[in-house]
Image: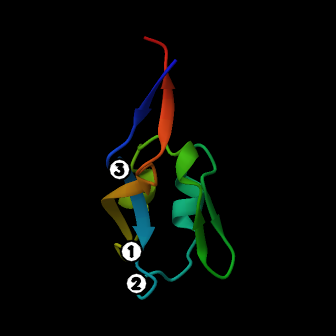
Amino acid sequence: MRYKTYKQNIYLKGNFFVVDKKQCILCEKCEKSCPVNNIKITTKVEWKHEKCQMCLACFHCCPRNAVKYENKAKCIDTKNKTQYCNY
């Protein structure tokens, strides 16, 4: 059996929408425009990024341009951890 040891953390890149809380007026237009019901508005905007289809409907329908698109990286802590290798 062999094991591979990671020397550094792994970063996964992802594209995410964020809401500028200062600009958002909670008009619910983004929530209504989302084809997969990815957005929930109560007293704040809640996003379920895993369902997003990147249709940009929320981005285009916002009257205050409060919806922003950002490319972020998510870190997975793998430094000095091992993984089984089948070779």
Identify the mark nearer the N-term, 3 or 2.
Answer: 3
Q: Amino acid at mark 2?
A: Gln
Look at 42% across and 88% down and name the residue there.
22
**Quadrant that contains the C terminus:** top left
Please state if 61 lies on the left or on the right of 84 as rendered: left
Label located before the other in sequence (1 or 3): 3
Q: Residue at x 37, y 77 (%)?
A: 64
- What residue is rendered at 37% in x and 51% in y? 9
- Residue 7 at x, y = what percent? 32, 46
Q: Nearer the viewer, residue 71 or 10?
A: 10
Q: Decide if residue 86 is on the left or right side of residue 9.
A: right
Nearest to viewer (mark 3 / mark 2): 3
Would you say the residues marked 1 and 3 are in contact, meaning their CB atoms lie under 8 Å apart?
no
The correct choice, above or below, for 22 with respect to 15 in the image is: below
Type of amino acid under label 3:
Tyr
Measure the alpha-carbon separation of dots 2 and 1: 5 Å
In this view, the residue farthest toward the bottom is 22
- Tell me residue 84's x, y (percent): 52, 26
Q: Nearer the viewer, mark 1 or mark 3?
A: 3
- Disc 3 crowd, CA 10 A, few/some/many (<14, 14-19, 20+): few
Q: Nearer the viewer, residue 9 or 62?
A: 9
View extreme (top): residue: 87
Residue 19, compared with residue 79, is above or below; it is below
Q: Which residue position is annotated with label 3?
A: 11
Labelled disc at residue 58 = none
Residue 51 placement (x, y as % from top left): 57, 44
- Which numbered marker is on residue 23? 2
Residue pointed to by mark 1 = 66
Query: Horizontal placement of 14 versus 48: left or right?
Result: left
The alpha-carbon separation of the residues under discs 1 and 3 comes to 27 Å
Q: Mark 2 or 1 closer to N-term?
A: 2
Residue at (45% x, 58% y) in the render: 58
